Amino acid sequence: MLRVTGRHFCQLLREMDNLHSQMRFGFPKMRSPSMVVTEYDRSGAVLLYRSCRHGLSHYLMGQLLQIAKDFYNLTLNVEVVKEESQDLTYCTTFKLDFDNAGFVKEMQEQCASFHRPYLSDFTLGKLFMFFPFGLVLDPDLRVRLAGERILQLLGKDLLGSEFLEHFTIQRPHIRFSWDAIKVFQSVTWEVQSTKLPERSTRSNSLDTVSETPLRRGSSQAPWSSQQSSLTSFRGLLLKGQMYILKENNIALFLCMPLLNNLVEMRETGLFLNDLAMHDLSREMVLKGWDHCSRLQILYEQQEKCSERLEDAHVRRQKAKARGDDLLYSMLPRQVADNLRQGKGAEATCQTFNEVSVLFAEVCLAAGSDTLGAMDLMKTVNDIYKLLDHATDQYSVFKVETVGGVYMVVGGAPEYQPDHCAQVAALALHMLMEVVEAHIHNLRIGIHVGPVAAGVVGLKMPRYCLFGDTVNTASRMQTNGKAGRIQVSERCVPVLERFQFSTSFRGKMQIKGKGEMNTYWLEGRDPSAPSLATPKPSINTNTTTTITTPDNDHHDDDDDDDHDDNTTQPNGDTDGPEHVVDAVEKREEDEGKEEEEGEGKEEEEGEGKEEDENKEKEEEEKEVKEEEKE
């Protein structure tokens, strides 16, 4: 760009401000410096450099030296004449020594060509036919003459008034004066009217076009409303060149309106016929309209793309949440997070001095083999839904389900000081859930002791427990009864501290352990604080009941007839109560209903027989009467 900016080095310096002015459209936030050639002769020039940044003058000196050497093959000498600060602007005056004879000769030839009598009388009136927005200023900076179009827009009051009463200087950033016009003749000027054009009101009243440009559907490009609001308040923006006629001691401002699109042109009260044909004003307006239309289409496309990205992000978050829920249901959160961080399975292995292990099994009767596979799976699945709902309300972790066996641990992998109470409360809650769903075949066992735990497997990692405690808890369950909770002797002291009630079952022969004292978990004092965290209940629509096996292999327990009051595991009832009583009471109610049904059937049968006898007697009477007749 610098190679084609000026034929001579001095021309390059004079065009730098104009070059920065064009670059600001591509870099709207750029705070460009200003460089103006105030004097020039055959041996060099004087350059005025102004910038809002301090300390860049030496950087500019290096650039000028290199440009003069590489592009113009000149030897340049730079000298700082003066440095000062004005209104937060740092000004530096440079004396540039270089061979400037070519530029001076060209300028002298241009001045000589102006005096050639090609045209006889070319008045300012004829000049304003080509520049209908032009202005003529005197040394007092008053407007003496103006073009036809700008007078139509701003009114006749413009003539004879001071220039700064109607306009503000946008570029260059200087104090407006006659001397400044002399210095900045080679720089592009931009001025803005301080009031709205008069024709804009009339054109808006006659125009029925919508105030919102390029609206499609419900979407609107953000720049459309912004441009509309800006043009509504900024007035008319003129861009051109200030040129002094020394013979007449006046300054010409040859300019044209700066418009971005048809909307701005309409808001300023202009029409296409008001714009000159020899410049690019019309092309800029029409291209700006076409550019806005293209931007509107691109904006709508990007808006749809953003909506798709937002939807994809929401779906991704939901999928991630589902994946996390599934992962945390298979592995403890702490263990899963360690694996996510790249830690090996060995890092998850731990030993625990004391945890509580619970086994619960759905006892399938011998007749369940005749059930269909789908019915059996549905029933077991419904039971597991109830157990999962109960498990979620306590500080425990569901280890696994194998067949009809449901395994839970408390106190691992995160230690809980009340792990035994949490597991016991969960067991009572499980029984309550299944009883309410008309299921009476759940058998539960609990034991407390040390275990080793960790993740096993790579393809399908599982959190597993190892140790004799797991085996003993499993034996407590397999040697228990349906609808009962059997606990080991080691659990009893801990449970009593948390106001649980237990009853001694007796000495049981446990496989691999010999004789062990076992206990039934009966309930908990309702005045004790709840251990559960209430969550919304679920509807499983469970109606299928699997009959409890008749051939229970533990018939030697006849000491289960206790007068204890029953209680629900969360302590919401009026008094402690035996959990099995609820099951037995439900069975007694069903038996009474069956007996009542049988009695009703017998009564109905007897009633039918009496009716039949009456009918026979009536028929016999009718026959006898017919015989008599």
Image (cartoon, rainbow, N blue to C red):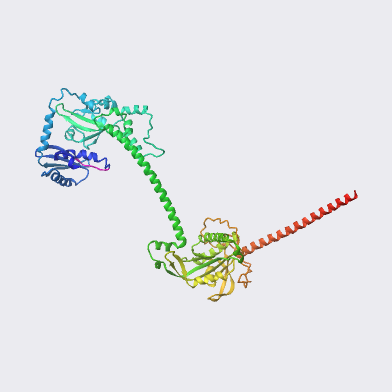
Toward which corner of the image does residue 121 lie, by quadrant? top left
Range drawn in magenta: 29-34
> Which of 144/98 is in front?
98
Residue 149 shown in magenta: no
> Which of 86/51 is in front?
51
Toward which corner of the image does residue 176 lie, by quadrant? top left
> How many callouts does the rendering have?
0
Residue 197 appearing in the image? yes
The answer to whether residue 278 is left or right of residue 560 is left
Furthest residue toward top: 121
The answer to whether residue 173 is left or right of residue 436 is left
Q: Main secondary structure of the magenta part?
A: loop
Q: Quadrant of the N terminus?
A: top left
Furthest residue toward bottom: 514
Residue 120, compared with residue 221, is above or below; it is above
The answer to whether residue 244 is left or right of residue 579 is left
In x, y percent, where is residue 25?
27, 40
Residue 45, compared with residue 469, is above or below; it is above
User: Which residue is painted at 27% across and 42% down in the image?
Assistant: 26
In x, y percent, where is residue 227?
33, 36
Residue 148, compared with residue 339, is above or below; it is above
In x, y percent, where is residue 133?
25, 28
User: Which residue is painted at 19% across and 23% down in the image?
Assistant: 123
User: Which residue is painted at 12% across and 26% down in the image?
Assistant: 116
